[in-house]
Image (cartoon, rainbow, N blue to C red):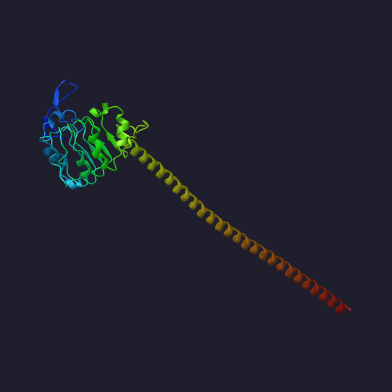
Amino acid sequence: MGLCEFSGEAIRSTLHGTDGVAYAQPLSHHDCLGLCAAVTDKMEMKKRISLELRNKTPAEVAELVVDNCRSSDGEIEGLTDEFKELEFLSMVNVGLTSLAKLPTLPKLRKLELSDNNISGSLETLAEKCANLTYLNLSGNKIKELSTLEALQNLKNLKSLDLFNCEITTLEDYRESIFELLPQVTYLDGFDAEDNEAPDSEADDDDDDEDGEEGAGQLGEYEEEEEDDEEGSEGGEVGLSYLMKEDIQDEEDDGDYVEEEEEEEGEEDEAEVRGEKRKREAEDEGEDDDEDDD
């Protein structure tokens, strides 16, 4: 026996080991979604909202899912104006018959109300959720086009779902809705030209991949720049090194020339000294001849 992370209720699950023995196994949030429907459809909406807060304040919540709980007398309860940052709200199969107690939710963009018993009073949506872009009313008791006239004031509404509503059986249903609500681009997942609405999650993934690819290309470009800079620096070092080599070669050549000049000078001096000694020897020879005479 374990506590369901989703509903807070005790749920029994068994796990059979390889030895054939059954062990008690508490269900995780992901695993118990299907099983806990039987529990949560008995849970009051107010309690369910309290559980979904998970130690957060209403002002910190951007997404709220209270599907399959129980509303009191078909009215919304536990949802207040404090949820001012709420952008996504799902109240699927909660037994709603009225939206009269819907609080003001200025940032709400997406509202899931499928599988309820709503038949009218949609003007509340335009008053309390003026920035809605997506509205799902599938599986409700909407029969007449006049019921949807209140949605004309939702100027940002782009997508509307009415699957399994009686209104969908009307002749020229789609043409009539697009004419009544010209701001709507997609009705039941398709536009007026029968083009399917894009998957918002897939679009987000594509954007992320494009961002990663762009970042990768930018990184490669930066690496190339760094390599170019290193190459340039290397070229400068090489040039200066060559210049130094040339200067050294010139100095070496100068030293070699000086050495040659010194050697030539020494040879000249040796020749001069030889000539001098030769003349001195000749002079001495002449002096000896005169003495003999």
User: x, y (%) of residue 218?
Assistant: 43, 46
The quarter of the displayed image where residue 143 is located: top left
- 55 or 289, which lies in front? 55
Examine the rendering and report whether any part of residue 37 can be seen: yes
Which residue is more in the foreground, 84 or 7? 84
The x, y position of residue 282, in whole percent, is 82, 73
Q: On the picture, is 107 further left or further right than 278?
A: left
x and y, in percent, of residue 255 in the image: 64, 64
Q: Work out which residue is located at the far top of the displayed protein and give it.
A: 20
Q: Is residue 35 above or below residue 234?
A: above
Position of 261 compared to 131: left or right?
A: right
Which residue shows up at 12% across the image and 30% down it? 39
Residue 57 percent across, percent down from the top left: 16, 46
Left or right for 277, reference 171? right
Above or below — where is 46 with respect to 264?
above
Q: Residue at x 53, y 56 (%)?
A: 236
Judge whether 146 appears above or below 276 on screen. above
Look at 73% across and 66% down and name the residue there.
Answer: 267
Residue at the far right in the pictured view: 293
The one of 130 and 279 positioned closer to us in this rendering: 130
The mark tally for this picture is 0
Task: From this view, report whether residue 286 is shown above or below residue 259.
Answer: below
- Tell me, yes or no, if residue 201 can be seen here: no
Quadrant position of residue 246: bottom right
Image quadrant where one finds the C terminus: bottom right
**Residue toward you, 270 or 165:** 165
The quadrant of the image that shows the N terminus is top left
* Quadrant of the rendered image containing residue 132: top left
